[in-house]
Amino acid sequence: MPKYYEDKPESKRPCEGLKEDLKSCLLESDCVRLDKKTPKECLQKGTRVDQSCRALQTSFFECKRSLLDTRTRFRGRKGY
């Protein structure tokens, strides 16, 4: 579930909100808390990671990929 950061100043970095949501989701997952693995290991192995974290990972990937897409010059970045 995305979180909205009203108290934080507006970031100029694209996809920053998705990155923070993914990070917090992974840190709260069973893989990190119970298995004591790093978030990177949890994403690579795919064990005990919630579907909401996987959805955030996909959204973050799509956001980053849209930055490299030359068609975004005309359409604008995703999520804005």
Image: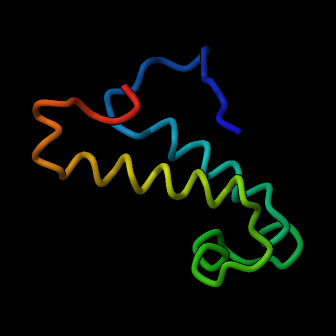
Which residue is rendered at x = 61% and y = 54% of the image? 55
Seen in the picture, residue 54 relative to 1 is either above or below; the reply is below
Q: Nearer the viewer, residue 3 or 72?
A: 72
Q: Nearer the viewer, residue 59 or 34?
A: 59
Seen in the picture, residue 76 relative to 22 is either above or below; the reply is above
Q: Give x and y (percent) for residue 23.
A: 61, 52
Seen in the picture, residue 55 relative to 41 is either above or below; the reply is above
Quadrant of residue 80 in the image?
Answer: top left
Q: Residue furthest bottom?
A: 45
Which residue is rendered at x = 63% and y = 61% of the image? 54
In the rendered image, the quadrant that contains the N terminus is top right
Seen in the picture, residue 38 relative to 22 is either above or below; the reply is below
Which residue is rendered at x = 11% and y = 34% of the image? 73
Q: Give x and y (percent) for residue 65.
A: 29, 54
Is residue 71 found left or right of 65 in the rendered image?
left
Is residue 35 found left or right of 67 in the rendered image?
right
Q: Residue furthest right?
A: 34
Is residue 12 found left or right of 22 in the rendered image?
left
